Image (cartoon, rainbow, N blue to C red):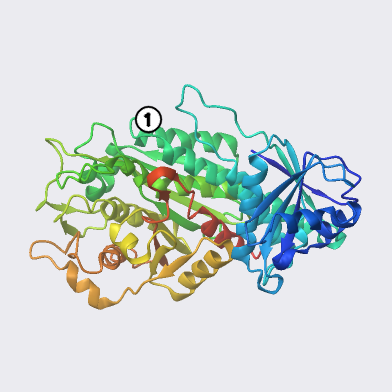
Amino acid sequence: MMDFARQSGSLIKKRSDCLIVGIFEKRKPTPAAETLDQASDGLLGKILKRENFKANPGDTLTIHHLPGCRAERVIAVGLGERKKLTGKSFAKAVEGAARAVLATAAKKAVCTLMEAPVQGHDARWKARQIALRFADAAYRFTELKSESGDPPRLKQVDLHCPDKEDGEAVDRGAEEGRSIATGMKLVKDLANLPGNICTPTYLAEQARHLADRHGTVKVTVLEESDMEKLGMGALLAVSRGSRQPAKLIVLEYRGAKAKDKPIAVVGKGLTFDAGGISLKPAQNMDEMKYDMCGGATVLGLVETAALLDMPLNLVGVIPSSENLPGGNAFKPGDVIKSMSGKTIEVLNTDAEGRLILCDALTYTERFEPRAVIDVATLTGACIVALGRHASGLLGNDDDLCRALLDAGETSLDRAWRLPLWDEYQEQLKSNFADLANIGGRDAGTITAACFLARFAEKFKWAHLDIAGTAWNTGQNKGATGRPLPLLAQYLLDQTGA
């Protein structure tokens, strides 16, 4: 993982592989860029004019051996209009800078973008974004390639901080960004693995490795025999078609007093979802290895909390299985009994995520959590409704949902709240059981959450549908690591950070 350090002093006297400076619209320089322009007798400004540098957020121009400074290369980064530099624009500029540096042979870079004034955000936030986005941009998944190519050479980014009063905030923000990026790397590594490697058993092993890395984390893995004793008929029904045994993975991070009630995060861990008897179409079915992104997010979030020594208690629960067709697979029309005692008519075996989650939610009651958040790649309907920009959010507590929305805005990992009205529950009525597992074509994301709400009546609960945000499809296929930034920000907010 990339290292980050705070730096001060002269920009033109220190040697560096790469120096990053910001440029506002109409080629107006930031203080660092102005210093370089003066040191080069105006050459920087002339080059920007000659190259017709527009300075839109994320635009970059690489200049080698600029006279007057000892950096081997200078990267000018567009920031857009000074008065309209929002958090989103700043993040876009940092991402552009990261791509430009990573395209060079630089091993160490100095970034001066801390000096850019961002609307509504302080030095700590800016440092967090720089560290997070540089580390994330350097991510490569080459584990399964025989020739992985050259890894990124960039190993360290120094954050130039001319204001000494901001020093502590910059240090803390950089550490937060690096820790969130470490959690995201774990999420993406697990999610990008194929289903023949990343099985429920493999996920459980990774949870144990996480506990080995952090003394504040305890892991318990429930086997199918344990789940049978608990009456988890919904979760076990889903796993029946697979030869891979289901696991219920429970992680406990203790960063506060034992008596303090924990926050619980429940993540869907379907390591491969073929749809069961209600078989999915063949096209893009390979992407169903990403149906465990919710479970991977739980692991990454616990990793981040432990790295930052967050002063709170956190419980992570991951119901994990495969959903495959087979002679013993559950069938449309089956009626199964959940751990809560509620019976469920299965109308579609491809609506399995809510079945494993409902038993996990009931199990989570034993921890007496102050809030429960479930994270799941649950419905294709969420992609239709919100695209791939925002995660869907539903819940039974306005304050919890508002806190998550605010965390999404701060972290730039946004969510959008959908209604959870009683009228939608009508769609889940069944002639043969307490409820059906689907509610028809209309409002699919909402009725899926309505189903889960039946098992979350004893605590404050929110549901994040990440079907559109957990991975990219097409040529840039791969896990995104979302919504870990949102959830990490939520936890930071709960600590008063």
Q: x, y percentage for residue 447?
A: 26, 66
**379 sits to left or right of 73:** left
Q: Secondary structure at mark 1?
A: loop
**358 sits to left or right of 56:** left
Residue sticking out furthest to the front:
50
Q: x, y percentage for residue 424?
A: 24, 73
Residue 295 sits above or below residue 328 on the image: below
Residue 157 sits above or below residue 483 on the image: above
Three-letter amino acid code of the residue under disc 1 = Ile
Identify which residue, 133 or 357, lies in the foreground: 133
Q: Is residue 216 visible?
A: no
Quarter occupied by the C terminus: bottom right
Disc 1 marks which residue?
Answer: 197
**60 sits to left or right of 241:** right
Q: x, y percentage for residue 110?
A: 77, 47
| Residue density around tag 1, few if under 14, some if 14–19, many if 20 or more, within 10 Å | few
Residue 384 sits above or below residue 131 on the image: below
Question: What residue sits 19% from the left and 65% below the top?
Answer: 441
Name which quarter of the figure residue 373 lies in: bottom left
Identify which residue, 466 or 212, lies in the foreground: 466
Residue sticking out furthest to the top:
146
Question: What residue sits 34% from the left and 52% below the top?
Answer: 360
Quarter occupied by the N terminus: top right
Identify which residue, 356 or 139, lies in the foreground: 139
**83 sits to left or right of 270:** right
Q: x, y percentage for residue 62?
A: 71, 46
Q: Is residue 188 visible?
A: yes
